[in-house]
Amino acid sequence: MTFYDKFLSQKAQCQLFICLITATFSLSYADDFIDVIDGKPSNEFRGYYKREHSLIKPYQSAGLDVPNWDIIGGTMIMQNEIRLTRDVRSQQGAIWNKVPNHARDWELIVDFRVHGSTGTLFGDGFAIWYVQEPNILGPVFGSKDYFRGLGIFLDTYSNHNGPHAHSHPYISAMISNGTLHYDHDKDGTHTQLGGEESGCEARFRNKEHYTLILIRYVGDTLSIFTDISNEGIWKKCLRVDGVILPTNFYFGISAATGDLTDTHDLLSVRMFEQEYARVEKPFETNSDKIEPFASNIAAPRDHIPDKKPSKLGWIGTIFLIIIGIVVIVGVLGFGFIFLQKRQERSRKRFY
């Protein structure tokens, strides 16, 4: 080996060492930020506020449009909130940012409220998006299926009868490259980011106050925090490493109702670009061309179908219950009369 070859070899080793040190520092930096955010005030902000990706009151300009945002479906712009759906069946509504995002690392804070029935039946929920194709209504909480990018789902009704270890409302995430299907019958558990239980229960319905969610994407790590109880403190919901997202996608929020209903209101959206010392990989030289990817998603599991409802309906069910009660009373009455007759015959034989 010549001196030049040795020099190149040593140079390559040195570059590799520097990369490893930088990567280790970057991961440590991300970990520190997770620790800093969890338990900290939810009114503290990090990074650079991006007005073009944010939405605050007053929503409308003099021309009655919403600057930088498209309104689709049944969405209504009101004085104090943006109503994505009313508390009626079969509603879809969404609001989409018109400006593509060019920041590699970012935080998105959404202030929202979901309210409706005080019973046990309500739905369906809403979603926060960072995707390639905006402004398309569809079956996934009011937006399109087979999307490319990131979906954060705030699901209020459980469709899955399998071995869930959690209740609803439930927050989860999904990364898709356009080939994955979100299955409502499984609550998306077969494509859930980070594993089937990588999410959090969040009882955000029917609060007297607005509730907050923070989505943070920094250094290929996706983390979600919530302030549900209006305590002014962030609480960690989930964290997943190995999440790859490109730039030049669009932020959006959508909601839907089906046979079950809720009112889905949006108060504000605030986006902050984050400073982060990235170690770019060879395939990430053009961040617009990166393929959405996640190294850890839930393994598929069988779907247990819902029990079919009775064809009799509630009137028929009540009728059957009444008949059952009559039959039981009749049997008991017949038994009582039979015993009385038998005792009378026994007494006559005795005398």
Image (spheres, rainbow, N blue to C red):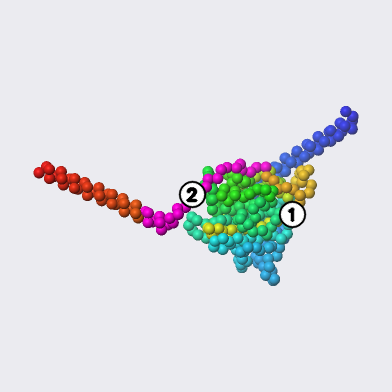
Q: Is residue 312 left or right of residue 286?
A: left
Amino acid at circle 2? Lys
| Residue 251 sits inside the magenta stretch | no
Tell me the magenta residue range. 295-321
Residue 294, position as x, y percentages in the image? 68, 45
Q: Name the residue under label 2.
A: 307
Q: Which residue is drawn at 63% across and 43% down?
A: 297
Q: Residue at x 62, y 46 (%)?
A: 191
Q: Is residue 197 visible?
A: yes
Q: Can residue 115 be seen in this view?
A: no
Disc 1 is placed on an element classified as loop
Residue at the bottom extreme of this rendering: 62
Disc 2 is placed on an element classified as loop
Residue 97, position as x, y percentages in the image? 69, 60
Q: Name the quadrant containing residue 144.
A: bottom right
Residue 153, position as x, y percentages in the image? 61, 52
Label 2 and label 1: CA atoms lie apart by 44 Å
Residue at the top extreme of this rendering: 1
Which corner quadrant holds the N terminus?
top right
Amino acid at circle 1? Asn
Q: Mark 1 points at which residue?
A: 248
Q: Is residue 189 left or right of residue 148?
A: left
Decide which of 121, 203 is in the foreground and name it. Answer: 121
| Residue 320 sits inside the magenta stretch | yes
